[in-house]
Image: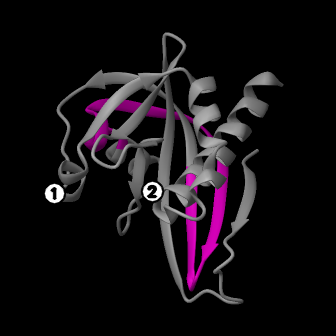
Amino acid sequence: MVKTAEIHGANAYKTFSKTRVGCRGIVLKDSHMLISHEVNTDSYLIPGGGLEENETTEACCIREINEETGYIVKPVRHFLTLNEFYKEYKYVSHYFLCEIIGKSEQKLTANEMKRGLIPEWIAPKIMLEMYEKYDDFTATDEEKRGPYLREYTALTEYFKMVEN
């Protein structure tokens, strides 16, 4: 069963008029988790991105992880759907537990190249500790606070799932 969670930003409107759907994957290897590290913004994110027209959530997860990291994955479990509300937007993120089935080249967008996106392997508990500090960015960096809160929520649900 897929868990659903919600985050309501302080700036969320009472109703939303725009929706953006994306998919992210938790990929583990040797007790480490695959992370998309944006070197130039010093941000660490669970790899993933936006759903394209006529694309399934599984296909989006596979494509986005491959583009960002160069790893070819197979989603094995959809464990969380996270709905976030900011201004007039509803952001829907589907989180999958994935296994690696191959390797290829990264296919970064111009924006990802500008941000210096590189794949890194980091222990999940270290990522959880980093993400749980999302409130530290409230006054200074909303572009980091929101995604870190999203990733903290997802990793917390991941740990609940694997501990049961």
Horizontally, is 21 left or right of 130 in the view? left
Q: Residue 15, relative to residue 130: is it above or below?
A: below
Residue 87, position as x, y percentages in the image: 58, 83
Viewer-proximal residue among 76 and 107: 107
Which residue lies at the image location 63% right of the left edge and 24% below the top edge?
125
Q: Nearer the viewer, residue 117 or 159?
A: 117
How many labels, in total? 2
Magenta-drawn segment: 65-94
Residue located farthest toward the front when viewing the structure as drawn: 139
Q: Residue at x 43, y 46 (%)?
A: 61
Q: Is residue 76 magenta?
A: yes
- Residue of label 2: 56
Name which residue type carries label 1. Ala
Q: Is residue 15 left or right of residue 56?
A: right
For residue 150, above or below residue 119:
below
Residue 43, image x, y percentages: 41, 45
| Residue 79 visible | no
**Pointer 1: what residue?**
110
Reading the chain from its start, which is encountered first: label 1 or label 2?
A: 2
Relative to the observer, which residue lies in front, 40 or 87?
A: 40
Q: Can residue 131 be seen by looking at this rendering?
A: yes
How far apart are labels 1 and 2 at the CA level? 24 Å
Q: Where is residue 163 drawn, in percent x and y?
A: 79, 23
Residue density around tag 1, few if under 14, some if 14–19, many if 20 or more, within 10 Å: few
Element class at badge 1: helix
Does the magenta run of residues contain 113?
no
Q: Main secondary structure of the magenta part?
A: strand
Residue drawn at (49%, 39%) of the image: 25
Residue lying farthest top? 30
At which x and y percent is residue 48? 42, 48
Local crowd size for mark 2, using a 10 Å CA cut-off: few (<14), some (14–19), many (≥20)? few
